[in-house]
Image (cartoon, rainbow, N blue to C red):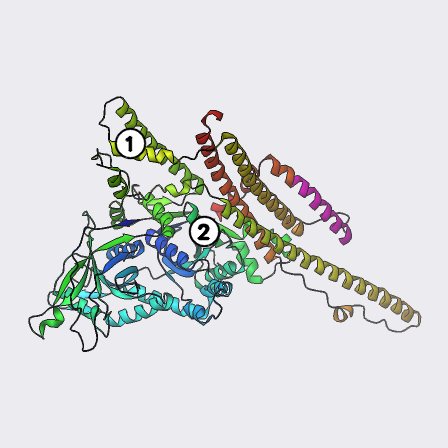
Amino acid sequence: MADPVAKEVPLNSVQVEALVVMKIVKACSATFPTTATGSIVGMDVNGTLQITNCFPFPTADVAASDSHPNDHMAASNLAAAAPRSKANVVYQNEMIKCLREVNVDANNVGWYTSANMGNFINTSLIENQYYYQKEVNERTVALVHDVSRSSQGALSLRAFRLAPSFMAAFKEGKFTTENMQKTKLTYKDVLIELPIIVHNSHLLTSFLHQLPAELPKEELEFPASLQELTADQPPIPLYPNLESLDLSIDPYLEKTCDQLLDSIETHYTELNNFQYFQRQLAREQTKVTAWKTKRAAENATRAAQKLAPLPEDEWERLFKLPTEPSRLEGMLNARQVEQYSRQVDGFTASITSKMFAVKSNLLPESS
Amino acid sequence: MAVGTDSFLHLARPLAPSAIGVQPTTAPLNVIIQPQAVFSILDHAIRRDIRDTQSTRVIGALLGVRSEDGMEVEVRNCFAIPHTENEDQVEVDVEYQKNMLALQLKANPREVLLGWYTTSLELNSFSALIQNFFASPETGTFPHPAVHLTVSTEAGKEIEARAYISAPVGVNAERAAESCLFIPVPYEIRYGEAEKSGLELISGAKDSENRAAPVVSDIEGLERAVDQTLDLLERVSEYVNSVLDEEKEPSNALGQFLMNALSLAPKVDPQDIERDFNNHIQDVLVVSYLANTIRTQIDLSQRLATATLTMGGSDALAATGGEGGGDKGQRGGQRGGKRGGGRGGGQQREPREPREPSE
């Protein structure tokens, strides 16, 4: 990050092996709704980050020691912090050492996490990714797999990196208004999304061709009876997935609405914090001005009495101005809201087309 | 949901030279393999080291869960084990296997060692040796049978897989360690709901030249699904028409099946449909509209928070200016929303997109 010479070609896309997709999907759905995290390994070739393998981080000891069975939030938080915890760094190094022996790319290129309806933009993600980009390797990505959205239709797997400008700001830890005005940093510059391409090996392609795919083109034998037909159904092809024709959307919309409301609440808290800060600041400033006028008057009288004037900058010691709250939380919240509304747009687009299709199907005359 | 194999004859057999007092299970066994395990094996086959070993196969351990009665094992995970093989001896890195197993179990505490895999269909005396290692009470799966999965990975041929368990057989006690009877057991490749979307994406790439496919958005996926459905419907109606024209042979079973399918269409009043449709679509649009309004509001608030307001220069004026701006923004946002939330979103995005590649 600090060295611009080192990065000849900026990362512009992420290529994920099918194996990694399947492993992440499995790991994330197994722990749902608790967050799952893991490490990914691979190589970067001419600006394309090739992700060739991955492994989950152990979170078991946490879950086992947790006495509350329904307290998955705590486990979630711990799992979310896993990528930068010390024990897991050791685990990761150990695992990579082992993987190197069997010719797997022994180069840590980031981490993955699971999400639930796009709720992944939070401080935890930022801190993890910051840790990776700073400590481990600049060219690392965070893969986010959205379990709920994937169950509804197309697979939702996205790759993110922190923008260099944000990295610089986060390093200094200064998210004050003044600083943000100076650097022109907005919530849109926090994360950079990279396009993902899924890649299969030759062997895998060969294997996939053996799985049920397209319907047979040649003439088939007629079934003798209805029983035979229902008992011996043709295999369902994997692609395209007809599951996305499902009409039910309400649970997803509801969930997104809930999350939006949460975001608004966060926004208000932030706003209140800031207003409180401004009131504090104004109050202190009035006090300072009052003190200054008093001192000026005193000095004037002392000058009249031919005495040495008292120092006028003592107020800095006497009054403590409140520190400005960080704008980071608000920024992330804004980015999160943007993410939610994009998601809703996506839902709306597909559901309206589906609904119009159903309507004109049931009422052919009206269309 | 599953890719099954043919019917199998289950043989009851002793698993290992049985110790006194331990009754090993002899029940039939069914092996379920999850796709990621197969993918992992294939990946390992590609990454095999051909420099310092004469063998063309690689081996690894299978991990997964066993059902309570031990009748069914589900292979969920696997890891590679380095080994070398030449004419007269085989060497497996036992230390590595132990370490890796411990590491894997740390992350997936519910999984247990189930057996091992190799990437050739051949069963030889080395296979027996390794099988006995994995089935032994100290280092293996005893009293449960160790599963041996063979997957052929020869280029240009079909990928075949077979699952076996073993029973001890031997001419005499000295040879018992390197011989065993492999008994084929049925297996199926099964995938769950969650993996479906992943598999869809992966199989989407199988016909392309460079074996790659981009992650698609929901709406593109929908388009493909609709296209596919239209194709299927087309095919059925073509068949029905040609039966009506007496060009093709009719089939009672197919006719019945189609009738059943058609009768599934709900009989509802057109007005009800109209009403439900309108209600629902309004709900959806309202949510979308609200979401976009909220986004505009928050965007605005973020901008105002960091904007340099130079109205009169004093703090108080700047604050009131900000609030006034907020109110105006609210109204503006709502107007924008009414025109169509989706479009507003698109325009918002535009200035950001071109910047991304240059980052």
Q: Which residue is mark 1?
A: B255
Q: Residue at x 32, y 28 (%)?
A: B237
Closer mark to the observer between disc 1 and disc 2: 1
Q: Amino acid at mark 2?
A: Ser
Q: Which residue is mark 2?
A: A148
Residue A325, percent across and down? 65, 61
Residue A175, percent across and down? 61, 58
Residue B255, percent across and down? 28, 31
Q: Is residue B356 left or right of residue A175?
A: left
Disc 2 secondary structure class: helix
Tell me which segment is drawn in magenta. Answer: B310-332
Chain ID, mark 2? A
Mark 2 neighbour class, 10 Å CA radius: few under 14, some 14 to 19, many 20 or more = many
Q: Quadrant of residue A104 in the image?
A: bottom left
Residue B345 in sight in this render: no
Residue with the most extreme bottom position: B20
Mark 1 neighbour class, 10 Å CA radius: few under 14, some 14 to 19, many 20 or more = few
Q: Residue at x 85, y 64 (%)?
A: A293
- Secondary structure mainly formed by the magenta segment: helix
Residue B91, percent across and down? 18, 69
Residue with the most extreme right position: A305
- B329 magenta-colored: yes
Cα distance in 3D space between marks 1 and 2: 39 Å
In the rendered structure, find residue B194 and report the number of the disc placed on it.
none
Q: Amino acid at mark 1?
A: Gly
Residue with the most extreme top position: B245
